[in-house]
Image (cartoon, rainbow, N blue to C red):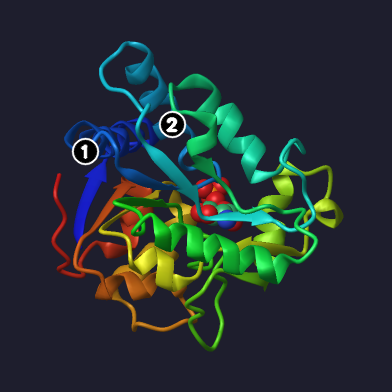
Amino acid sequence: MRIYREKDYDAMSRRAANIISAEVIRRPDCVLGLATGSTPIGTYKQLAAWNQRGDFSFKEVHSVNLDEYKGLSGDHDQSYRYFMQKNLFDHIDILPENTYVPSGLAEDPEEECRRYDELVKSFGYADLQLLGLGRNGHIGFNEPSDHFVKETHVVDLTESTIEANARFFASADDVPKQALTMGIGCIMAARRILLIASGADKADAIYKTVCGPITPECPASILQLHPDVVLVCDEAALSKLEGTGVEICG
Ligand SMILES: N[C@@H]1[C@@H](O)[C@H](O)[C@@H](COP(=O)(O)O)O[C@@H]1O
């Protein structure tokens, strides 16, 4: 793992956007795995600004998102499809038909998961997979558990995730209790993984991701087994790595 320390959220976002834009410049028809949550918003803003300035184009890029809430339609303002439209897709030149998010409204969610898994596989998996990090170490919506789940699947959200995401809804009761998420297999099959984290409330999860045992109790810890992972974090998120001897750039 290569770990970058950035001063604050804006610097983290710029560094992450630079890594993503480098991928698009190097390979204009790449497959980008994309993430939601508050952490990537600054990264997406930066990418949109550079794209609008004409620095590079997303016209040949395909994107596959990690997850979607079960039961929310793409035009629900808390759905992840809506999030992607508002924070990225509506502001860049990516072709709408080249953007993929699991459907939260599929009549048969299990079938939708199988279809999505096949779709990501048919692209040869992501060239670059962007990940945020849950406070409990989840990636996508792969929640802490006693086993890793390989395929795209329907997951019961944990109380801590519902509580963390309640800030986006009118109340915790409005947060969907289930989601469809890419499994660990699709994520780990990405050629390169970029994990971003900001703030002290991520410090414990970052410590466990980097220094802890590889265990489904901290799903992100499996990234230790991937050959090309870049972590871009602000100082607060890295605070628990101090004194561990882990090598950090910057
Ligand atoms: N499914 C998403 C994750 O992909 C994201 O990484 C996490 C962290 O969100 P935030 O960046 O808002 O802390 O939230 C959600 O649960």
Q: Position of residue 192 (x, y in %)?
A: 26, 56
Element type where label 2 sits in the image? helix
The image quadrant of residue 169 is top right
- State yes or no: discs 1 and 2 in contact (Cβ < 8 Å): no
Kind of residue sitting beneath label 2: Tyr
Q: Is residue 144 left or right of residue 8?
A: right
Q: Residues within 10 Å of mark 1 (few under 14, many from 20)?
A: few
Sequence order check: which comes first, mark 1 or mark 2? 1
Residue annotated with mark 2:
44
Q: Residue at x 70, y 44 (%)?
A: 79
Considering only vertical position in the picture, is 125 above or below 196?
below
Q: Position of residue 200 (x, y in %)?
A: 45, 52
The image quadrant of residue 225 is bottom left
Looking at the image, can residue 224 be seen? yes
Number of marks in the rendered image = 2
Q: Position of residue 190 (x, y in %)?
A: 32, 60
Q: Is residue 86 left or right of residue 213?
A: right
Q: Residue furthest top?
A: 53
Q: Nearer the viewer, mark 1 or mark 2?
A: 1
Residue annotated with mark 1:
27
Q: Residue at x 17, y 36 (%)?
A: 26
Considering only vertical position in the picture, is 211 above or below 141?
below
Kind of residue sitting beneath label 1: Arg
Considering only vertical position in the picture, is 136 above or below 103?
below
Q: Residue at x 34, y 84 (%)?
A: 213
Q: Is residue 71 left or right of residue 138?
A: right
Marks 1 and 2, Cα distance to the nearest angstrom?
A: 19 Å
